[in-house]
Image (cartoon, grey):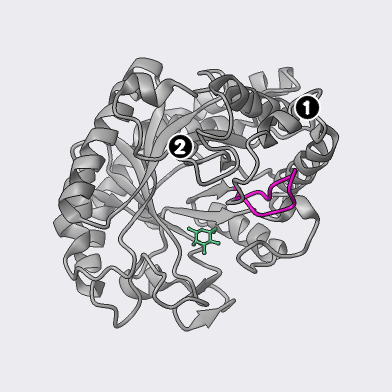
């Protein structure tokens, strides 16, 4: 079934070639345009949900349960034989100029794995648990409610934060293959802002300040030559309707993918909130022509042996979701994992999930042709 889908996607991709060269020309004409590969990725993301839902996993190839840094290793690949179609990484603490992220992954390794993921035909998504530029605390430091204002133009931390953005731009610009092709990525900063656990959260800044934060971020990255990024806006499950979802939306000109992050604690509550949030993004996605995704999802420790086909798949399959991504298998906190690994209780069910014609892994997708 996977082979059949691959063929369909290859045929569909064939029709994109002509379009790709037109985009390349457009990209060359404007300093701020995106590279042809980035435009092609966006075009294919818009089509992919007609083929299935891409599976994603955070930090998939950098560590897992009982291992760290093994070349080519992935808990997901060990269980089902293929890599996730989407792998996300977090760039928290890149802004400090240090060598490793807040989760102790060397940025050099992240750079390498983003390029590897591109070369296997999948997508990389990047979140940013950026430190608090005012207090010196971490992303979760919500002790001061003027941080966003302080980094906007005219604010006392604007110059400092501009330096942090420069480091981000340098990293994004450095994502290049040996042949010099810039690798497209999905950048997903300022996430879960409808809650109030990060310094950019709902109770910590006004809607206008939040929107300005986004505009400043994208404008600064583009001004520094970042032309290989798509941008994702992702809330928590707080919005109850489309108006609430869009209250802090920075604008169609800035955003390519809209999504939300949702975790299971109680199954019924999870299913209800998935359905509510999916209906919201589906309706906005159609009205605004945006790709929709479940940007983070999961059930910590996956204690339900049938969770993949019994809960996750039924929750997402009714909607044209491009991808659903589960959080990390923390090697340093062994109960903090969201994907199966060999011997884990949901391993067999995950293989069924993988075999479903509705799910897509790295070998199933054509994103750059
Ligand atoms: C959280 C947890 C933390 C981690 C953070 C950023 O959800 O996994 O341990 O530091 O994400 O990756």
Q: Say above or below: 256 vs 6.
A: above
Residue 99 at x, y percent in the picture: 76, 64
Label 1: which secondary element: helix
Q: Is residue 236 something one can see in this rendering?
A: yes
Report the residue marked by disc 2: 234
Residue 363 at x, y percent in the picture: 39, 56
Q: Quadrant of residue 157 in the image?
A: top right
- Assign the magenta stretch its main secondary structure: loop
Label 2: which secondary element: strand
Residue 94's mark?
A: none
Q: Is the residue at mark 2 in contact range of ligand 1, meaning its CB lies under 8 Å from it?
A: no
Q: Residue at x 52, y 32 (%)?
A: 40
Residue 223's mark?
A: 1
Q: Is residue 129 magenta?
A: yes
Furthest residue in direction front, as rendered: 143
Residue 263 at x, y percent in the picture: 33, 53
Q: Which residues are magenta?
A: 128-139
**Left or right of 35: which side holds 180?**
right
**Left or right of 318: which side holds 160?**
right
Q: Residue at x 58, y 59 (%)?
A: 116
Q: Is residue 245 magenta?
A: no
**Left or right of 258: which side holds 343?**
left
Residue 303 at x, y percent in the picture: 24, 71
Q: Is residue 24 something one can see in this rendering?
A: no
Closer to the chain start, of discs 2 and 1, is: 1
- Spatial CA distance of label 2 from label 1 is 24 Å
Q: Is the residue at mark 1 in contact range of ligand 1, meaning its CB lies under 8 Å from it?
A: no
């Amino acid at each position: 079934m996977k082979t059949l889908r691959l063929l369909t996607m290859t045929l569909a991709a064939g029709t994109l070639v002509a379009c790709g060269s037109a985009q390349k020309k457009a990209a060359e004409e404007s300093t701020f345009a995106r590279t042809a590969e980035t435009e092609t990725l966006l075009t294919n993301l818009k089509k992919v949900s007609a083929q299935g839902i891409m599976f994603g996993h955070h930090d998939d190839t950098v560590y897992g349960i009982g291992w760290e840094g093994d070349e080519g290793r992935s808990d997901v690949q060990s269980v089902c034989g293929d890599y996730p179609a989407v792998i996300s990484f977090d760039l928290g603490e890149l802004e400090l100029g240090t060598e490793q992220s807040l989760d102790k992954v060397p940025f050099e390794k992240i750079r390498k794995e983003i390029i590897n993921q591109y070369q296997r035909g999948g997508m990389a998504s990047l979140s940013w648990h950026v430190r608090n530029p005012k207090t010196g605390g971490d992303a979760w430091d919500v002790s001061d409610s003027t941080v966003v204002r302080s980094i906007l133009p005219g604010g006392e931390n604007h110059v400092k934060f501009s330096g942090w953005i420069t480091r981000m731009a340098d990293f994004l610009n450095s994502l290049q293959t040996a042949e010099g092709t810039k690798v497209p990525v999905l950048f997903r900063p300022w996430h879960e802002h409808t809650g109030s656990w990060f310094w950019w959260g709902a109770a910590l800044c006004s809607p206008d300040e939040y929107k300005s934060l986004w505009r400043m971020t994208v404008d600064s990255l583009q001004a520094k030559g970042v032309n290989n990024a798509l941008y994702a806006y992702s809330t928590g499950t707080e919005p109850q309707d489309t108006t609430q979802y869009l209250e802090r939306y920075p604008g169609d000109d800035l955003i390519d993918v809209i999504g939300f992050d949702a975790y299971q604690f109680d199954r019924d509550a999870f299913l209800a909130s998935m359905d509510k949030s999916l209906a919201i993004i589906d309706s906005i996605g159609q009205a605004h022509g945006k790709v929709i995704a479940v940007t983070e999802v999961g059930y910590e420790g996956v204690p339900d042996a049938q969770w993949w086909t019994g809960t996750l798949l039924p929750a997402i399959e009714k909607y044209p979701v491009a991808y659903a991504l589960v959080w990390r298998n923390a090697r340093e906190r062994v109960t903090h994992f969201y994907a199966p690994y060999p011997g884990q209780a949901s391993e067999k069910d995950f293989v069924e999930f993988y075999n479903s014609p509705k799910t897509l892994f790295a070998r199933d997708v054509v994103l750059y042709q």
